[in-house]
Image (cartoon, helix red, strand yellow):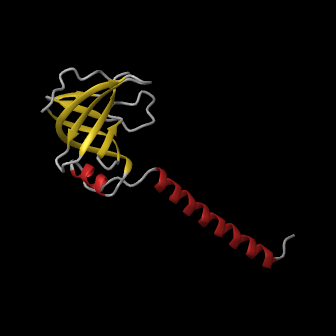
Amino acid sequence: MIPPRQQAMFRRLIALLAVLLALTTAAAAQAYFPTPPDTPGDDGVAQAYAQHLSHVHVEGSGVVLKLLPDDTEGDRHQRFIVRAPGGERLLFAYNIDIAPRIDRLRVGDGIRFAGEYIWNRKGGIVHWTHHDPSGRHVGGYIEVDGRRYQ
């Protein structure tokens, strides 16, 4: 039988370990899943850029500035550059091994999108603009002329 004084110390130790585990788990979750911008829509990209956030889901719009050659290394990606309303230049990497190619995309087209944003000093990268066949990642999309590609 454990003396009452040692039982009390043991309970306090268990409580302290539980608190430390909760704090460590919360910190790790915040580091792995940063808080997305609070403002929805186009301001999400501007806030993510201003706060140097990466791996956050954003929704927004913009105008296609340039069509780039496809990236054919590994999974194939259709690539293009979009200017967001806040002036950020966004490189889109749209996986055409998972989703259909956007053949009708032209310079000057307005688009709407949802995807994962990654900060860089030029403006950022947007990817995961398609569904996730395995269902483990938030899906995204690109809309051009009222048609949604995902």
On screen, 129 above or below 46?
above
Tell me: residue 128, above or below residue 24: above
Q: Quadrant of residue 64?
A: top left
1 lies left or right of 125: right
Q: Position of residue 139 (x, y in %)?
A: 35, 35
Front in this rendered view, residue 84 or 115? 84
The picture places residue 57, in percent across and down from the top left corner, at 34, 45
Compared with 41, 115 (above or below) is above
Which quadrant of the rendered structure holds the N terminus? bottom right
| Residue nearest the viewer, comparing 137 with 4 | 137
- Residue, x 16% and y 47% (percent of image)? 85
Rendered location of residue 41, percent (x, y) = 22, 48
Which residue, as the protein is rendered here, is positioned at the far right?
1
- Nearer the observer, 23 or 117: 117
Q: Determine the residue positioned at 22% across, 43% down.
A: 60
Dividing the picture into quadrants, the one containing residue 77 is top left
**Would residue 67 be found to the left or right of residue 48 on screen?**
left
- Indicate the quadrant where residue 59 lies: top left
Q: Is the C terminus in the top left, top right, bottom left or bottom right quadrant?
A: top left
Residue drawn at x 20%, y 37% as measured from the top left: 112
Q: Is residue 120 above or below residue 26?
A: above
> Which of 66/20 is in front?
66
* View extreme (bottom): residue: 5
Total number of numbered discs in the rendering: 0
Question: Which residue is drawn at the image coordinates 41% and 53% (left, top)?
Answer: 34
Q: In the image, is 143 to the left or to the right of 29?
A: left
